[in-house]
Amino acid sequence: MNHRWFVAASIATLALWGGARGSWGKEEFPTPPPPLSEDYFPCMENCHKDMEVNRTPRKLEEEHADVQLHHAEQFRWCLDCHDAQNRDKLHLQSGEKLDFTESYRLCGQCHGDKYRDWRKGIHGKRSGSWDTKPGAKKQYLLCAHCHNPHQPRFKAIAPMPAPKPPARWTRASVPAKGQ
């Protein structure tokens, strides 16, 4: 009897867990357009339309020389995120193509804890209604609005001196009403 209860509970848990994980990519998060350079985007119109795909990791010296990859660069190359056939798209590890407005799903593949927190409003910035009901107007900033996707770590800043405590006051130093 206890064995059947355990099996039933296990199946129910797996079904609920699997359904929750499967819904992650199906939620909609309204975002403003990503901060893309007008010099480059749309990529296929401007440069990559007739260019042969070169999958060899290398230092870019002609175009995109200003892009310095400091994002697990020992393991990553441009085409791990940018789609080789259509540079106006990103792609997931599964091969699914994404618009840049859904780049949070790409970032979430490796940064699952940040993605979870972003979805819940703990990480990143969102504006609009706090209402959780469907149809409540919200806008989410993409990861790339705050982090450079090629160098996502914030630069260190020098600490500022501690604030000075306010001057002590006494009743005598507070003006009386009408003075």
Image (cartoon, rainbow, N blue to C red):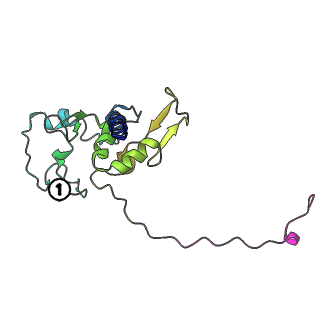
Residue for point 29% across, 37% down: 100
The image shows residue 67, relative to residue 48, as above or below, that is: below
To which residue does mark 1 refer? 75
- The extreme top residue here reads 135
Whether residue 101 is visible here, answered yes or no, is: no
Left or right of 172 in this view: 108: left
- Whether 64 is drawn above or below 18: the answer is below
Position of the N terminus by quadrant: top left
Asked whether residue 76 appears in the rendered view, the answer is: yes
Q: Which residues are magenta?
A: 158-179
Q: Main secondary structure of the magenta part?
A: loop
- The image shows residue 36 at horizontal and vertical percentages of 31, 41
* Residue nearest the viewer, comparing 23 with 115: 23
Residue 131 picture location, percent across and down: 55, 33
The image quadrant of residue 30 is: top left
**At x 22% / y 56%, what residue is drawn?**
69
Q: Residues within 10 Å of mark 1 (few under 14, many from 20)?
A: few
